Every structure is written in C-alpha cells, then in structure tokens.
Amino acid sequence: MSGNAPEPAGFGEFRTASGELFARMRQVRAALARGCDPSLTLAQLHLVEELDSSGALSVGELAARAAVSSPTVTGMLTTLERNGIVNRRRSTRDQRRVEVTLTDRGRSIVREQQHRLSARQRQTFDRLSPTERRETVDTMRRLTELLGRLDPPPPPPGYGRRSSPPP
C-alpha cells in the first residue's frame, strides 16, 4: 500500500490489537522466563530455546537464527555460561569452530519454561467458549500463514545442498 492511500476500515483497530497482543505475549514469556531463572532475559531464553531445538550451534549460526549480531550473542552467551546454562567448546572436527550447547541446567530451564507456558496457554484456552476456541485457532493459523507469505524465514543452513546423489 502506498503512503497516500487511505487506510481500509478497521485497519487502525487491527494494528492496535495486534500490537497489544504481541506486547502481551512478550510480557508473559518474559515473566515466565524470570520464573524459571530470575536472571534470564527474554532474549537469552530465545537463544536457549534455539539451542534446545537445534543442538550444538556455532555463535554465528545462533546469531543468524536469533536475528541478532554475533557480538550481541557472544555477550549473552558469556552471561549464560557464567550461570551454568550453556557451554562453549571448540569443535572436535574443526578447531576454528566454537560450538555452543546447553547444560543439563539449560535443558531443565527449557522444560520448565515449556511447562509454564503450556499451563498459561491452558488457562487462556479454558476461558474461551467452544466456538471461540475454534475461531481463535483458525484465525491464528490464518495469520501465521499470511505472515509467512509476506516475510518468509530464510532456509535452514545447508538447505538445497545434497550430500549424496538422489536414489
């Protein structure tokens, strides 16, 4: 839409409501993260969750997945390592590469965070009528689909490369 075109009816409300929803979701996740570990920030939790889902990653890979700079990730990792949540080690395959992994404590924090988030989601779900539940799920899926079309995420590392010829 060009800068001179009038806003469609209801767009201002949509913009406000979506901003409020995203802000509330960030607040809830941040509060839940602090409940798992008072020193854990939402940005640090994002790194920890990436490591949990991906396994060992280099600082650069982690920065790309978190959409922040490598120096920013390095600073966060220093704190997470000091708090016993992650380990940084040289790769056994490539000594130039530093790999970041979760400690047992880090994995425990992720499990606790998932449990707390699921409980909060259930509380919200239980307050909706059966019709609202269906409508909410349908709307969230539709918005997720539309957002994905507008700004698709980059492919994972190695996407499109074949390690061996097809069968």
Image (cartoon, rainbow, N blue to C red):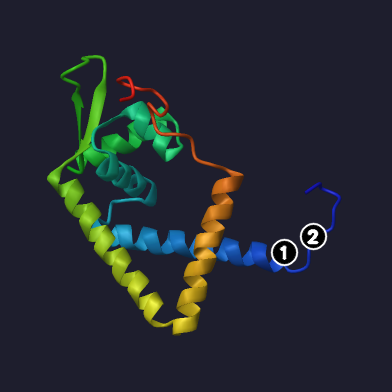
Relative placement, left or right, of 5 versus 163 is right
- The amino acid type of the residue labelled 2 equals Glu
Q: Residue furthest bottom?
A: 129
Residue 159 % position (x, y) = 40, 29
Identity of the amino acid at label 1?
Phe
Disc sitting over residue 11 in the figure:
1
Answer with left or right where residue 105 lies relative to residue 24: left
Residue 6 sits in which quadrant?
Answer: bottom right
Characterize the local packing of mark 1: few (<14), some (14-19) or many (20 or more) Cα atoms within 10 angstroms: few
Q: CA distance from mark 1 to mark 2?
A: 6 Å
- Residue 115: percent from left, percent from top: 25, 64
Which numbered marker is on residue 161?
none
Classify 1 as above or below 60: below
Q: Are marks 1 and 2 in contact (CB under 8 Å)?
A: yes
Q: Which residue is mark 2?
A: 7
Up the image or down, 126 lies above or below 152; here it is below
* Relative depth, front residue between 147 and 57: 147
Q: What element does badge 2 sit on?
A: loop
Report the residue at 32% width, 20% height from top: 165
Q: Quadrant of the C terminus?
A: top left
| SS label for mark 1 | helix
